[in-house]
Structures are given as structure tokens and as C-alpha cells.
Amino acid sequence: MGIYFDKENNIFKLDTATSSYLIEIFDQNYLLHLYYGAKIPDTNLNMLHARSTYASFSAGNENIPFGDFSADTWPMEYGCNGCGDFRISALQIKDKTGCNATDIRYISHEIINGKPSLPGLPALYTENDADAQTLAIKTLDKVSGAQVTLYYTVFENLGAMTRWAVIENTSDNAMELERSMSLCVDLPEMNYDMITLYGRHNKERTAERRALAHGIQGIASKRGSSSHQQNPFMALCEKGATEDFGNCYGFNLVYSCNFLAEAEVDSNCGTRVLMGINPSSFSWHLEAGETFTTPEAVMVFSENGLGEMSRIFHRLYNKHLIRGEWKEKKRPLLINSWEAAYFSFDDDKLVAFAEKAKELGIEMLVMDDGWFGKRNDDRSSLGDWYVNTDKLKGGLDSLVKRVNALGLKFGIWYEPEMISPDSDLYRAHPDWCIHVAGRERSVGRQQYVIDFSRKDVRDAIYAQMYEVLSSTKIDYLKWDFNRNITEAGSAILPAERQKEFFHRFVLGTYEIMDRLTKDFPHMLLENCSGGGGRFDPGMLYYSPQIWTSDNTDPIERLSIQFGTSLCYPASTMGAHVSACRRTGYDTKGAVALWGTFGYELDPTKLSPEDACRVKRQVEEYHKYYDLIRWGDLYRIKNPEEDGFDCAWEFVSEDKKEALLTVIVMRRDAMKNRILRFKGLDPEKKYECDFDNEEYCGQTLMKAGLNLSQMHLNDHEVVRVYIKEVD
Ligand code: DGJ
């Protein structure tokens, strides 16, 4: 199995298919980080703990010979505040004295087969114990009485590990947890580039790469969600690393609220990486005997570039994060009413969409925003989750039956964490929205956020949802979240617990999502937050797919989908063909095929030619479904970098087939256009639908295909499908 304890050297070795991770129990029971990188055979690596020679001003420990150790410069496994380690801290606890100096030391450990779950939190899981092994290292801060257990799960066959910490107050007094990060890794060098995913509404998860420099650099959210602006993902890759070469570390937090991901390069040119709940808007009050569990962080290492790092994330998430019936089951090809009708629809119009959609081969109609309360624009009714019978004249059940009778499934939209000032719910419970007494309540999209940290509020919203969802057959629910949280105060928490608010809020959201998935196990949940403002592994635990972006322009989508794919698999990325006129249907279809395919347009307005194109896309969706759903992604030409072309490829796990898609970003009549496949079996012979010739995998990967003679215009698509010759 993946975890081994070398008693002689007091070293833990955690191996995955691609990496090794070593921790040492050092003198005075300090936990030191020895190594994280490519898989190695030895464990006796105590020599790696030394970092730099003695330096003035670096404090040591009075029980360790002078100069032999300093928490300031040595690699600490979970760096603590105020006892000699001056770098960014993973842990900071204020004890009964009011001091927040913190210092944990090893006391015992346990190796467990399988993986424990995290109470109330989304987390990776195993279906059987053979899939993973977990190391739990118990440590203690003697003075405060905080017992901190560091957990490490090793997915040995997948090249990935996860980490989290559980802090228990074993003292007789209350303490404040001011910082408790999910991961801390001390790397010995600084020659890395940091890659993060920045964005905004309509431009989520665009990859950005910069060289590390001395000092602290990083990304964060304090918006009450993982956010459009930064995703809880960070990669450190060796300078010069590409899709196919170089050491790459990928870190991703299984969390949907305020986070922090930082790297600090210290004066000796070592790099500390931290990831966890953003401490700027967090603290947790622990009474004697109480515990706190941090969210889980995922760590992937690849020595073969960013492409392999992404494929490890994809396999891991498809197998150990996505849950429930829809993990394996084919996702329905849907049409969503939003861009087709916005708020202006009634049941007859929706049935007309469904009739046309059926003709085209579409499998599910989703009724988006506007079906409830008096909602005719975005100024009212959030919180009034009862059917608007002016629009659905025969009621919801009658509409669902009419759509089902056509042979289509039916889906619905909700925004459960929100409340409109103009709603019956707000008039009855103005105190239910998040607010700070005496402060103005900021509005976003004309709405407030409801206090999901409160059980009474959650129960009331869930009761309304349950009534509607159990009144008829709902196959799909789109859960939206259209603003960030301001004036983050709780009307019921005492002053010393106010900084718990954000975490309690997201735990409340997770609880309702958990109830939904348990009460309606057949219903497919798709998350959304004004597009992809909450696209994170925490949400993926409940909803196997997330609407990637409100931006459905296929060309602008390319950078969004490339960035998203750094750690999230195709099976999670909601991608639809819309009426956008920038490109023709072939390009729109090719881009949407990368994700969970669907439509976002009025099908009754399609020209006969476009309707034929849509029918062809539907056939292609079925033809390539397994290849894209379960295949390996290779990013061939990045839209932000190449300038002329953008290209990506899916290769089936058995390497028997592959689909390469090229989009012309900028036409240049004179330019050679050679496209090389990746990830094929060099020995296999493939038939190629581009020229109906047969080529060896090696030829397609090394010589490539020559598209130079094609007269391609800007934004045109070329798709090449290859299949092993029988
Ligand atoms: C934002 C989402 O991203 C859209 O797809 C749509 O559902 C609207 N909200 C509805 O208000």
C-alpha cells in the first residue's frame, strides 16, 4: 500500500503512482517536511531536513544543539505561528491567555485503510478500502491543549493525495482558532512558475502564469463563494514546464467559500505553499472538548508537465469526487430556456420549445429563472418558491406531464440562498437576510442573501423546495447563486463567534445540497453562480456538473474551457450551443461538445439549415459521448498562446480512438498548419477520417497531419476522428 513508516529513521513515506511525499519526526518531536516530488525508492532521507547554515536572528530550540535546527528556515510539516517560524502560518490558535503563539509536536500516528469522511464537508471518497490509504498523525500544542491531527489520504494508483486537519480542544478552557490551513508544503527551491485561474463574470478561470519571487504571492476570495475572480486552484511548475515536460504540482481546495492560496519564497530561496480557509474573514471558537475540521485539499504531482497533472485530477474527480447515480449514467442532452426566453414564457411556449427540441433529438427541457412568485424580471420573488400560475396556467405538474408526454425529461431552476426585498418571504422575515444591525444592506442584482447559517431559515426554504420537487417528476435542478455576500453578520451568533459566519453559511448550503441529493437521488443537480462563480470541487461533490460560464460565445469560451480543464474534467463543465452569431453552428457545436453538451436558444427560431446542423450535432454527441466523458484530454494548442490555432484532443483510455478538434483563431493564408496528435499508442494503426488513410500512432504523433492546403477562415473548425484499424 502507499503509506509506509520507517521506524529506524522515524520517517513516513507516502507513495502514489507518480509521487513520493516524506515527513520526518525530528528531535523534540518536531514534524519536518522532507520531500514532495517524483517517486523515489528510499526512505532514509533525514539529510534533506537541513536547510541553509545557521543564520543570526533565526531562533532555535533550547533542547536541540545550537545551530542544528531552526523553525525559521527548516521545512516544517505544518508551520505554526509565533514560535520561531516567521513564514506564513498553517496554524494559529489564541489560547486562554490571549496569546497566539502555537507549536505542535508529534504524539502518535495511525495508518487506516480507505478514507474517512469529513463531517458536514464535501470530500473525496472511496467505494472500497483498497482504493486509498490514510495516515493520521496526532500532534499536540502542550501549552494551549490543542490536539491537531493531520490527515493524508494517498490514492496510490492515481498519482494524487489529499490532506486536511482536525483540531480538538483538549484543554478545560475555550480557545480561538485563528488560522487552520488545509495544506502546507515546504519545497526546497523557488525556481517555479505559479499558475492560477483568474476571471470575472463572463470570463471565468483564465490561466495566468508568473514566476515566483521572494516574499508572499497568492490568490484569495472573501466574497462568500469560491468566486469568478479566483478559483481555489494553484499550480507550481518548474520554469520552462510545458503541457508535456517538467515537474508540476497542482493544489485544489474542496471548498466553496472564502479561501486563500499562497506561496512564500523565504530568504533562503525555499517555497512554502499554503491553502485553506481565508483567515482574514475567519476564526472559530472552540469550547473545551469541541473539534474543528478543515476542508480537504487535493495535491497532484506530475513530472511530465501540466497535461499529465490535469489528467490525474480528471481521473481522480471522475472516480472519487463525483457521486451518485449520475457518476456513471449518461447525462441528458438538454435545452435551457434562459437565453431563449429569459423571464418571458408561459407553459405553452415551453411546450412549443419541447416539441421542436424533441424533433431535434434533445432529451430534456430545463425551465430556468422566472417560474415562481411574481417573477417577471430580476427585481422580485426570490424566496417565494411557489408556482406562478399566471405563467404556468395549468400548474407545474401539468406542464411536466406535457413535456414528458413528448418524451423529454424536465428540469427546473432555483436560487435557494437568495431573497428579494420585494418578496412575501422578505416582508414576513426581514431579519432572515444576512445583515449587520444598523448598516445599510448592499444589494447585488437587486437581491439579498438569506442566512443559510441558520437552521430555521434553511428548513423553511427546504420545506418550500421539497413541496414543489415532490409534487411532480423533476429530473434536474439548476442551483444558482447570483451575488456575493456583504455585511456578513449573523443575527443569532454571539460576538465571539461572528467570524464563524462564512464557514457556517457554506456548511448550511452543503447541508441543503446533501438533503436534496438524499431525498431526490435520481435528480441531476447542476450548480451555477452567474455562470461559473462557484466552480469548485466542493460543489462537484453534490452536483456532477456546473454551468461553466454565462459567456456562450464559442471563441471566448475557449480560454475559459482551457483554464477550467487544468483541474476539472469535461464531465463537469456545462457547455451549450447558443444563438450567438460570432461563428457558425459547427464551431459552436465543437466547443460545446467538450463539456456536458446542450442548447441555450429558441429551437423554434432555427432556420431549416441550422436545424439540420443541430440534428447532426446531436448524432455526434452520441457518437463521441464515451470518448469525451471517459477519455484523456490533451491540450494541443492553447488559444491564449499560439495565436493562430486552438486545438485539443480526447483519447480513449484503451487508446483505440481519438478526436482532435482545431479552431482557427487567426487565418493566415500562407501559414503551414501541421497538427500532431498526442497520447496515441505508437504501435497501433489508425484509420483517419480526415483523408481516409491509415497511419501508425507514431506517425500521427511525430509527423502529424498537414492541414495547410485547407482554405480555412477565422473561427472555422476542423475535426479529425481516428480509430484503430480492426
Ligand atoms: C445566471 C445563470 O448563469 C444563467 O444561466 C441564468 O440561470 C440566470 N442566472 C437566471 O437568472
Image (tube, helix red, strand yellow):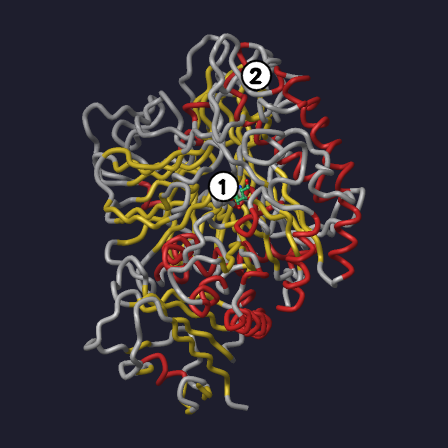
Counting from the top left corner in percent of width and height, residue 708 is at 27, 81
* 258 with respect to 149 (left or right): left
> Can residue 112 be seen from the camera position used here?
no
Indicate which disc, 2 or 1, sits on the residue closer to the N terminus.
2
Badge 2 marks a residue whose secondary structure is: loop
Badge 1 marks a residue whose secondary structure is: loop
Q: Nearer the viewer, residue 547 or 172?
A: 547
Q: Where is 402 relative to 618, above or below?
A: above
Query: Residue at left 32%, top 62%?
Result: 638
The disc placed on residue 490 is 2
Amino acid type, residue under disc 2 in the picture: Ser
Counting from the top left corner in percent of width and height, residue 129 is at 66, 53
The disc placed on residue 88 is none
The disc placed on residue 530 is 1
User: Number of numbered discs present?
Assistant: 2
Counting from the top left corner in percent of width and height, residue 458 is at 68, 27
* 72 with respect to 201 (left or right): left
* 498 with respect to 703 (left or right): right
Amino acid type, residue under disc 1 in the picture: Gly
Q: Is mark 1 within 8 Å of ligand 1?
A: yes
Q: Is mark 2 within 8 Å of ligand 1?
A: no
- Tell me whether circle 2 and circle 1 mark residues in contact (CB < 8 Å): no
Query: Residue at left 62%, top 68%?
Result: 360
> Can residue 691 be seen from the camera position used here?
yes
